[in-house]
């Protein structure tokens, strides 16, 4: 049972235009940033998820951010359904497009390993099994899309699209921005922009319909609260703790 925080997020102006066409905001994240979420499955606490921007490394011949996403069910919930998921993304410090993505899913009796490398220069993504798929030059995986979204100036009642590759398919993810709300989570009280991405992922914690993010309306632009529905109930991921990173000072960012 996993929630795709990276579809997160994913992951915006009206009328409808491509988000990449607009000047981005300053990059609000950097190495050392950590976001930890508590996951509630209906009235039951199911476990924790974390997003960690670990470092800048060379991947595909360029400097990239490395982000790790882990999801773990707690001891009580694991007695019913054990989750040990991990995803890793490398994305360019220059434009936040993907160069590498891998995930290891362990959810109950279900398991899957996926690994892919992106080559925007030739318009291909190559999986570990050797299969290739065509992609546009601005393609992002579900994790890098979430970080890219944090660089876009979110405004109420706006709409945009982000190109995302997942499960051997290219998706045109529609981003709808609804308005502003104040929410309280374990990490505190935040003024937020309410965002709805229209995207279909995989795994039990995939959503069937409405998926909503509350993104902090401040310099960090972090997903504070995520609500979604699955086949067997509703899931909430609430920010439990936040440690800011150190944004790059050499012009890194889109």
Image: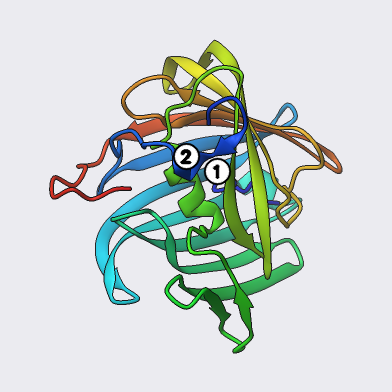
- Give residue 149's mark: 2
| Res 65 quadrant in image | bottom left
Q: Position of residue 170 (x, y in %)?
A: 66, 62
Classify 10 Å Cα crowding around label 2: few (below 14), some (14-19), many (20 and above). Answer: many
**Residue 73 appears in the figure:** no
> 120 or 150: which is nearer to us?
120
* Residue ranking furthest to the bottom: 130
Please report the residue visible at 33 percent of the width from the left and 48 percent of the height from the top: 254
Name the residue carrying label 1. 10
Q: Earlier in the sequence, mark 2 or mark 1?
A: 1
Q: Position of residue 130 (x, y in %)?
A: 59, 89
- Give residue 117's mark: none
Q: Position of residue 94 (x, y in %)?
A: 29, 55
Relative to 157, residue 68 above or below = below
| Res 216 quadrant in image | top left
Instruction: Give the side of residue 132 with respect to residue 247, left or right.
Output: right
Give the number of marks. Answer: 2
Q: Secondary structure at mark 2?
A: helix
What's the distance in space between the residues labelled 2 and 1, CA to CA? 6 Å
Please report the residue visible at 64 percent of the width from the left and 85 percent of the height from the top: 131
Please report the residue visible at 51 percent of the width from the left and 57 percent of the height from the top: 140
> 33 or 221: which is nearer to us?
221
Q: Position of residue 109 (x, y in %)?
A: 76, 67
Please report the residue visible at 54 percent of the width from the left and 12 percent of the height from the top: 180
**Residue 223 appears in the figure:** yes
Relative to 182, residue 217 above or below = below
Relative to 250, residue 239 above or below = above
User: Is the Cβ of the residue at disc 2 closer than 8 Å to that at disc 1?
Assistant: yes
> 35 or 143: which is nearer to us?
143
Relative to 90, residue 210 above or below = above
């Amino acid at each position: 049972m996993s929630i795709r925080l990276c579809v997160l997020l994913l992951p915006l102006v009206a009328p409808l235009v491509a988000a990449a066409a607009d000047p981005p905001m300053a990059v609000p994240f950097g190495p050392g940033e950590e976001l930890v979420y508590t996951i509630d499955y209906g009235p039951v606490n199911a476990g924790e998820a974390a997003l960690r921007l670990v470092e800048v490394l060379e991947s595909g011949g360029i400097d990239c951010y490395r982000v790790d996403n882990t999801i773990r069910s707690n001891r009580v919930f694991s007695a019913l359904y054990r989750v040990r998921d991990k995803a890793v993304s490398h994305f360019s410090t220059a434009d936040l497009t993907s160069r590498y993505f891998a995930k290891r899913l362990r959810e109950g009796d279900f398991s899957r390993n996926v690994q892919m490398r992106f080559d925007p220069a030739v318009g291909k993504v190559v999986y570990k099994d050797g299969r290739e798929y065509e992609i546009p030059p601005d393609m992002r995986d579900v994790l890098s899309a979430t970080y890219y979204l944090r660089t876009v100036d979110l405004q109420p009642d706006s709409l945009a699209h982000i190109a995302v590759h997942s499960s051997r398919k290219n998706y045109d993810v529609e981003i709808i921005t609804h308005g502003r709300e104040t929410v309280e989570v374990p990490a505190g009280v935040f003024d937020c922009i309410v965002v709805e991405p229209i995207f279909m992922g995989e795994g039990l914690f995939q959503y069937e319909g409405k998926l909503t993010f509350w993104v902090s309306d401040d310099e960090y632009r972090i997903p504070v609260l995520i609500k979604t529905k699955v086949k067997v109930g509703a899931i909430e991921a609430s920010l439990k703790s936040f440690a800011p990173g150190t944004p790059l000072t050499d012009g890194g960012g889109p």
